[in-house]
């Protein structure tokens, strides 16, 4: 009770004008969702076709993006269900998913891969799996409640202006942290991994992007604070999670400040920090063992030790302009001493972009977006790849290092009810951080159904 009273006092101190709408309206769908209904049922189907023509490459390795032209199609189907056990306060979410098809070059060869829907291990097959099963609890800290849009990750139609939210179970770390209204949804926005998420944030997840854990957050009109304790995979990019919490876990903290709340000019800044504990390999040890002729090739998997630490931080900015446009930016860094383990091979990143709603040309449910992201590696990470080492995504057999620079643009068109189509173009300079390969153009078409 004392702790709850402290939270309530904090809520009063941090209070202010109500947070303005941040694109709360859901996309059009085939099914309507009543505010009075305690149950939730919806679904999504997302199909992405991608192709790239041939591009120059002085050499290729085991984990290279293929330099000859290729095409690939992915499909992701998700069924969302939810039930409010205690109306307005407690809900249970249970989602099933099926991933089919694949990505260009089986998702190898790029740190900023071109399709966030792609499962990074094609050997997992296309059997349905349980994506989320989580308990979501609301603890009110004020008597003032406000109407919010219901959705598959929160079926509540009203929430207290000051509250604590607890989630526990199987979930996606990226559902809670590093959210950005203009660049977090690969189904209706950008497609690239390092545009939709902070590439330097090696967030806790299995191969499919999910984990078990606990998140606790304080939500107020101006300040939000989130904490998370989540399971790491047993091996890099692995499907199995490590339950040895004493030596393996992902710890996350994020503070969000709604610094501007004028009509049409809402602004939010998020600061994220994380520490991963896992059975990770050391780039330094792998390089030294190779140079000492102990290992025939640099192999970081031979130099893993339980309890190793990777830490990093990120910034995430979102600024609405005249209600119909949003500017966004991300920056991120991690120490780059231990192997990239759960998301992608990026040690530092910077991203800048915008999206524009189609009101001016009488298409309010259409979106146009443009983003630029530049990704980099630590000195140890690049030396490891240059000597012929393999990461779980990268490995050209050699490396003439250059930052991986990506420009992405898309147009998402609302066709009918819950049916959307999109065209997307990505230009990638120095794919896999290699000046000896590329540049490459990737062209995409997307079909999306919102039930």
Image (tube, grey):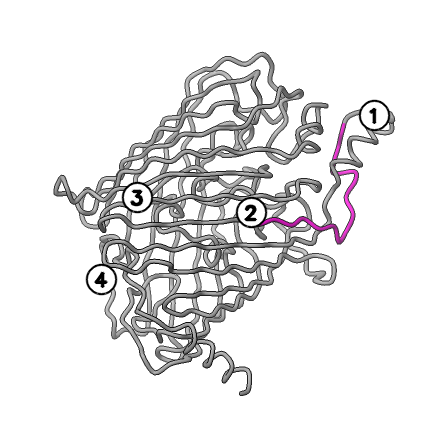
Q: Badge 1, how many Cα within 10 Å: few under 14, some, many 20+?
A: some
Marks 2 and 3, how far apart at CA:
27 Å
Numbered disc in front, either 3 or 1: 1
Q: Quadrant of residue 93?
A: bottom left
Please name whichever residue, 55 or 333, is drawn nearer the observer in this view of the structure: 333
**Which residue bears the numbered disc 1?**
291
Q: Residue at x 56, y 66 (%)?
A: 214
Marks 1 and 2, how far apart at CA:
30 Å
Q: Is residue 314 magenta?
A: no
As displayed, is residue 228 above or below residue 191?
below
Can you tell which mark lies on residue 201?
Answer: 2
**Which percent across, then down, holds residue 358?**
19, 42
Numbered disc in front, either 2 or 3: 2
Numbered disc in front, either 1 or 4: 1
Q: Residue at x 30, y 42 (%)?
A: 355
Marks 1 and 4, how far apart at CA:
63 Å
Q: Are marks 2 and 3 in contact (CB under 8 Å)?
A: no
Q: Could you tell me which secondary element the residue under label 1 belongs to?
A: helix
Q: Are marks 1 and 4 in contact (CB under 8 Å)?
A: no
**Which percent across, then down, holds residue 135?**
48, 70
Q: Quadrant of residue 266?
A: bottom left
Q: Earlier in the sequence, mark 3 or mark 4?
A: 4
Quadrant of the image for the C terminus?
A: bottom left
**Which percent across, then down, holds residue 155?**
34, 68
Q: Earlier in the sequence, mark 1 or mark 4?
A: 4
Numbered disc in front, either 4 or 2: 2
**Which residue bears the numbered disc 3?**
448
Q: Could you tell me which secondary element the residue under label 4 belongs to?
A: loop
């Amino acid at each position: 009770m004392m702790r709850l009273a402290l939270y309530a006092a904090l809520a009063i101190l941090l209070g202010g004008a109500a947070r303005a709408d941040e694109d709360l309206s859901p996309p059009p769908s085939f099914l309507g969702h009543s505010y009075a209904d305690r149950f939730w049922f919806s679904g999504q189907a997302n199909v992405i076709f991608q192709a790239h023509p041939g591009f120059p490459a002085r050499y290729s390795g085991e984990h290279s993006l293929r330099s000859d032209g290729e095409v690939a199609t992915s499909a992701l189907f998700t069924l969302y269900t939810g039930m409010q056990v205690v109306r307005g306060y407690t809900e249970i979410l249970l989602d099933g998913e099926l991933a089919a098809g694949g990505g260009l070059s089986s998702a190898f060869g790029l740190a900023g891969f071109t399709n966030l829907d792609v499962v990074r291990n094609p050997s997992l097959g296309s059997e349905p799996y349980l994506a989320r099963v989580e308990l979501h609890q609301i603890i009110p800290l004020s008597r003032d409640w406000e109407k919010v849009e219901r959705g598959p990750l929160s079926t509540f139609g009203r929430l207290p202006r000051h509250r604590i939210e607890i989630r526990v179970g199987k979930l996606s770390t990226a559902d809670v942290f590093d959210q950005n209204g203009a660049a977090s949804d690969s189904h209706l926005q950008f497609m690239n991994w390092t545009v939709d998420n902070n590439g330097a944030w090696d967030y806790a997840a299995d191969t499919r992007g999910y984990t078990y854990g606990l998140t606790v957050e304080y939500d107020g009109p101006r300040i939000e604070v989130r904490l998370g304790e989540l399971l790491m995979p047993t091996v890099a990019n692995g499907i199995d999670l490590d339950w040895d919490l004493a030596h393996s876990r992902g710890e996350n903290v994020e503070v969000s400040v709604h610094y501007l709340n004028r009509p049409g000019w809402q602004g939010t800044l998020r600061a994220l920090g994380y520490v991963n504990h896992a059975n990770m390999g050391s780039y330094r040890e792998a390089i030294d063992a190779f140079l000492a002729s102990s290992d025939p090739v640099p192999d970081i998997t031979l130099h893993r030790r339980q309890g190793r630490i990777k830490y990093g931080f990120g910034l995430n900015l979102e600024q609405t302009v005249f209600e119909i446009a949003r500017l966004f930016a991300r920056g991120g860094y991690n120490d780059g001493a231990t192997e990239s383990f759960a998301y992608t091979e990026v040690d530092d990143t910077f991203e800048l972009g915008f999206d524009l709603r189609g009101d001016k040309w009488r298409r309010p449910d259409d979106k146009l977006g443009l983003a630029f992201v530049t990704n980099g590696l630590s000195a140890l990470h690049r030396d490891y790849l240059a000597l012929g080492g393999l990461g779980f995504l990268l490995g050209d057999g050699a490396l003439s290092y250059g930052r991986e620079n990506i420009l992405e643009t898309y147009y998402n068109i609302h066709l009918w009810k819950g049916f959307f189509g999109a065209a997307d173009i990505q230009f990638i300079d120095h794919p896999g951080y290699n000046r000896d390969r590329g540049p490459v153009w990737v062209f995409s078409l997307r079909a999306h159904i919102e039930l």
